[in-house]
Image: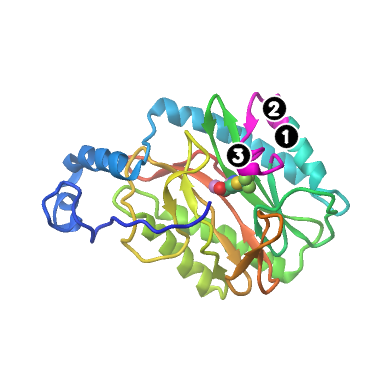
Amino acid sequence: MKTKSDKIGRNSLCPCGSGLKYKKCCASKGVSSLPVLKSEYSRKYKIRFKSPEDVEGIRKAGRIALDALDLAESMIRPGISTNDIDAALHEFTIKNKAIPAPLHYRGYPKSVCISVNEVICHGIPDERILKDGDIVNVDVTPILNGYYADANKTFFSGTPGPDAVKIVSVTLECLREGIRMVKPGNTTGDIGWAIQQYAEGQGCSVVREFVGHGVGFEFHEPPQILHYGRRGDGFLLLPGMVFTIEPMINLGARFLHVLDDKWTAVTNDGSLSAQFEQTLLVTEDGCESLTPF
Ligand code: MF3
Ligand code: CO
Ligand code: CO
């Protein structure tokens, strides 16, 4: 989804209304501030916390997402069209009593996104035939019993060259670095900071126009999860939050444009771009992936 910036973190005013910085107030008082924070985050920022029943629903949708990605992986090879992958994943999703969320979402015409090489995200499946050495991101979002799970992976078609291997491995590591930051007390900014540190340390760049997002009851909920930023910025992570982390990392510069189809985002410099995405739950003591890989 698209960016906008949000604020509230350890240096923000405490939501309890004391007028102190959060870190000097409720943050230092421990667990008793949790109900205050949760109701404030719900009321002011429309963050929808998930119950254990909700989490189980999202986990089941997540199982379908992972199985769909496995099916995509089994099909990806030189000679197949992206339309064929879309059709197979559509059928798989329906057979599992789920609905592909992308289909007709804001006018999107297909059931999954397939983004090849310099395509950053939201590639529309079409007659394009995969070639040897392509990198192919497949992004799936099944809705099962009203619950959404969102996940994507980048695969190789045939034998990858060294640039392809590099951008895909750096991007997977970016997702892992982001996930490592997910625990109560850390902030959304800590996630972005960790991802940016790693990506730029490897000489790659972080796309800023698209972000992770709350997910579960809807496709895109608050909060936004930036894949770059500063430690302590953004929202505190609280148990029961469910959101995606989905870094898009470029081998060249971070700048992009969207094609005339109004969806396909590509790197300006034509460099390779990769992405990995999981749906994460903040638990009492860390996190659980609801789409684990
Ligand atoms: N699955 C994408 C995400 O991770 C959103 C795709 S929107 C679509 O947020 F319309 F292109 F499907
Ligand atoms: Co997403
Ligand atoms: Co997605």
Q: Position of residue 38 (x, y in %)?
A: 27, 40
Question: Residue 279, can we see it?
Answer: yes
Report whether the residue tagged 2 is closer than 8 Å to ligand 1.
no
Q: Position of residue 153 (x, y in %)?
A: 64, 50
Q: Position of residue 71 (x, y in %)?
A: 73, 39
Q: Identify the secondary structure beneath mark 2.
A: helix
Tell me the quarter of the picture where residue 166 sits. Answer: bottom right
Question: Left or right: 177 with respect to 263?
Answer: left
Q: Identify the secondary structure beneath mark 3.
A: loop
Question: Left or right: 254 with respect to 221?
Answer: right
Label whose residue precedes the other's in the sequence (3 or 2): 2
| Residue topped by disc 1 | 90
Instruction: For label 3, count other residues whose C-alpha is less than 10 Å away and answer few (under 14), some (14-19) or many (20+).
Output: many
Q: How is the image coloured?
A: rainbow
Label whose residue precedes the other's in the sequence (1 or 3): 1
Q: CA distance from mark 3 to mark 2?
A: 12 Å
- Which span of residues is magenta-colored? 92-111
Report whether the residue tagged 3 is closer than 8 Å to ligand 1.
yes
Q: Is residue 96 above or below residue 293?
A: above
Q: CA distance from mark 1 to mark 3?
A: 11 Å
Which part of the image, by quadrant, shows the C terminus?
top right
Amino acid type, callout 1: His
Please tell me whether residue 251 belongs to the stretch shown in magenta: no
Question: Left or right: 146 with respect to 87?
Answer: left
Q: Identify the secondary structure beneath mark 1.
A: helix
Contact, mark 2 vs mark 1 (Cβ under 8 Å): yes
| Residue topped by disc 3 | 141
Amino acid type, callout 3: Thr
Residue farthest right in this picture: 79
| Residue topped by disc 2 | 94
